Image (tube, grey):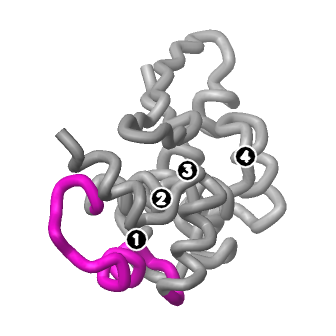
Amino acid sequence: MYLIILGISTKIGYNYIKIVFYFRGVNSADNQLQMIVWKMTGFIHQHYDKKLTLDDIAASGAVCRSKCCDLFNKFVGQTPNTYVMKYRITKSCDMLRETNRTVCDIAITCGFQSPSYFSYVFRSETGLTPQDYRKQITVP
């Protein structure tokens, strides 16, 4: 049995990671591929706060860049870069909800290169600016 992160969804006021368990005793090739994806998603989870390239992600699974993209599309349903961005948004939502850190600090902590790009991506994913998201979740 393997734990594979299939995707991250961010809803206003509710964040979750969709997790699916696979058991495929017959096809060991798929099990090996799933383990590679598991390694790569684990690498992203450990290093989301740093600049990540496709080369870094692929190297964590000991595959080439094109194989990395193929595996993400097959098992996760999105590109590695989309997965990284969505994971960063999920982590930033957690920080906005659980801390009083500034939006600028959260942006840098979550691996975004600038607070303005973070705000742009955050708004396109959630429909709210980071400040509005924080206000919405803190209103009783």
Contact? badges 4 and 2 (CB < 8 Å)? no
> Does the magenta portion include 14?
no
Q: Amino acid at mark 4?
A: Gln
Contact? badges 2 and 1 (CB < 8 Å)? no
Distance of label 4 from label 3 (alpha carbons)? 18 Å
Contact? badges 2 and 3 (CB < 8 Å)? yes
Give the residue number, with chain letter if any, for mark 1.
47
Give the residue number, with chain letter if any, for mark 3.
126
Give the residue number, with chain letter if any, for mark 4.
78
Give the SS element for disc 1. helix
Give the SS element for disc 3. helix
Mark nearer the N terminus (4 vs 3) = 4
Distance of label 2 from label 3 (alpha carbons)? 9 Å
Mark nearer the N terminus (4 vs 1) = 1
- Residue lying farthest to the front in this orientation: 140
Distance of label 2 from label 1 (alpha carbons)? 14 Å
